[in-house]
Image (spheres, grey):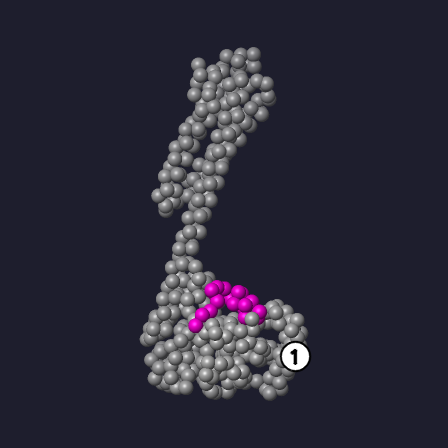
Amino acid sequence: MNKGAFFFFFFFFLHFSAFPQTRQECANADIIATSAPDSVESTINTLSDYFLEYLASEKELIRAFYFWTANKIEYDIENKFNFSSSDNPATIVAETLKKRRAVCQGYSEVFHALCDAAGIENYVVQGYTRQNGNVVYINHAWVVAHIDTSWYFFDPTWGSGVVTNGKFIRKFTNEYFMVKPAVFIKSHMPFDPIWQCLYYPFSPENFVQSNFPAKGMGKYFYYLDSIGVYKQLTTYEKQAATLRRIEGNGVLNNSILAYGQYLKNCLEIDRINRQNEIQNELVNQFNLAVNHYNTGAALFTRYINYWNRQFSPLRPDTEIKKMLDTCDFHLARSHKVLSEINPTEETLRKNIEALLSSLQDIQKKVEDHKAFLRNYFATPKNSRASLFRKYTWMGIPVN
């Protein structure tokens, strides 16, 4: 099932400019990005290797990533209301690099992948924005990255140009490069307050009202610790934690409500998938028990056929004993595996009960023959023939 139920759209307006890098650092990175040969631009690995060969510092690298992404990808006007049928980031990146066209998620995923390849901690953030002084409740994506000791924001989509009269016009800007959290929050509101990267995060009401007091309106939030914990979580746990924070920060508009529902759908899908994984594992365990049972039953049939021939041709006692011991081993393994299964589904429970019943029957017959063998081995060889009676393969006496 495709979880990517949200569309990301493109609107650009003049904002602010704030990037704590020297002009020389930017100039060097921009030249390297502009000079990237076509041969390295088809994959993230080759492109990142190219940048890593010529640039050393994180600041230069992330500048090159921003400059390249904003200048080499064109906004996809035709598909602004539709996005890839797959929400797999790797697929989005591959499609974006191939077509050189994307909406905001494509820009962000490429930038994100380049940062990942360079070992720069970063995350794709989803939320909504303020444009020309008005809040636009349309989902948008950008990136937050950890450079040196601080978190900064990057929006390569808005940095690439503008849409005028339904047409994309290339107009690179630094205004959305390496922006500090306190500035970026004025135009970009993440659904999850953790990605405000503020000790006093703002509520959706604050954002709508453009009310950004120095210390926010809420309680102190140690976001650095929360991000540290977030990194250690599973995907399911991340989604659950994100949903809790979103609901705690207030569901003010349909955009937040829809994203919250998206997370709930993801969690439900994950729950079903985990439930199916558990059920599949139980079925696999049951099949293992069946295999052991079938092996043991086949060996017992072989033993009974040999017993009906009164152990002819004669084999050493140790070999005869081993025939029944091997059969007993597989039946015991089948029983042990079944005992470890805790079925939650009625059909599986009935199948286990049926197999256990068959196991008990054949194990009783095996025990009878183990007793027979003890007597057989204790009897003088010249008197052993009198101990036999013929049985069918089901262990039923013939005479």
Q: Identify residue for label 1.
A: 35
The spot of residue 392 in percent (x, y) is 46, 21
Q: Is residue 51 left or right of residue 134?
A: right
Q: Residues within 10 Å of mark 1 (few under 14, many from 20)?
A: few
The residue positioned 50% from the left and 81% from the top of the image is: 168
* Region of the chain picked out in magenta, as a range: 81-98
Magenta run includes residue 358: no
Q: Looking at the picture, does residue 22 appear above or below residue 6?
A: below
Q: Looking at the picture, does residue 40 appear above or below residue 275?
A: below
The spot of residue 258 in percent (x, y) is 36, 69
Which residue is nearer to you in this view: 53 or 202?
53
The residue positioned 32% from the left and 75% from the top of the image is: 252
Camera sees residue 115: no
The residue positioned 60% from the left and 84% from the top of the image is: 26
Q: Amino acid at mark 1?
A: Ser
Which residue is nearer to you in this view: 100 or 45?
100
The spot of residue 138 in percent (x, y) is 40, 76
Q: Quadrant of the N terminus?
A: bottom left
Magenta run includes residue 89: yes
